[in-house]
Image: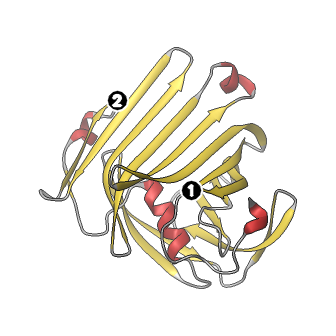
Amino acid sequence: MLGALLPARASALEPFVADYQVYNSGKVLGDATMQVVPSGGHWRIDLDIRAEHGMLGLAGAAAQQSTVFDLVGETYRPLSQALLRKVAFSKRRVVGVYDWNKLSAHWTGYVKEARQKPIALQEGDMSGLLINLAVIRDAQPGKTLSYRFVDGGRARPHQYVVAQELESVSVADMGYSAMRVNRVQSGNEETVIWVVEGVPTPVRILQRENGQDTYDLRLVEYRGVP
């Protein structure tokens, strides 16, 4: 529960389940669950988003993402990835495999032909979900964070800047001091992640386009997994 927040961020990776409320363009859209759990000698991170309001809710829209990974030193090394999008009677699945012996990753399923070509892996490459975990691990006021995103048949650098000053955020009617982490992006898109010391998951993830909020995940509670 949120009342059990720690005063300092834990250094070791530990399993947890986090519940979010999801907003779209400022209106409540539905719920989401993020979890990190042990899985067959590896680790797995999942993000399950469910639309429950509006037209998307009526259509039963949902998105399920997962990445199986190893912890190598302090590096999150992806092994496989899956994405399932559901709307009404339609299901679209994408599956990715990271082969570290061959230093190659590839994706199959509902993915553009150009993104089905193998991608040469580099040490430190991560999926989008793993980058969220890395931001939690690495964020410090005033710090710049650099990663390489390899996900869904794409590879590109991701850079984040952590604000020097802390911001007040409200989670489940409780106030906390958070680090605001902005992804440096060109064009009209913006991604912001808020990080609180001692919380293993983002307390808020906001995506904006043309200066307007699009998707906004706000933490409701989190709990450890035995």
Q: Residues within 10 Å of mark 2 (few under 14, many from 20)?
A: some
Position of residue 5 in the picture relative to residue 10 (left or right): right
Quadrant for the C terminus, please: bottom right
Q: How many marks?
A: 2
Across and down, in percent, residue 202 comes to 62, 62
Position of residue 111 in the picture relative to residue 48 (left or right): left
The residue that label 1 is drawn on is 226
- Which residue is rendered at x = 66% and y = 57% of the image? 223
Q: Residues within 10 Å of mark 1 (few under 14, many from 20)?
A: few
Across and down, in percent, residue 139 comes to 56, 77
Across and down, in percent, residue 58 comes to 69, 19
Is residue 74 among the parts visible in the rendering?
yes
Above-or-below relation of 60 to 140: above
- Which residue is rendered at x = 57% and y = 17% of the image? 88
Above-or-below relation of 142 to 200: below
Q: Amino acid at mark 1?
A: Pro
Local secondary structure at mark 1? loop
Q: Amino acid at mark 2?
A: Tyr
The residue that label 2 is drawn on is 110
Q: Nearer the viewer, residue 196 or 122?
A: 196
Across and down, in percent, residue 168 comes to 80, 72
**The residue positioned farthest toward the top in the image shown:** 89
- Which residue is rendered at x = 33% and y = 34% of the image? 111
The mark closer to the camera, 2 or 1, is 1
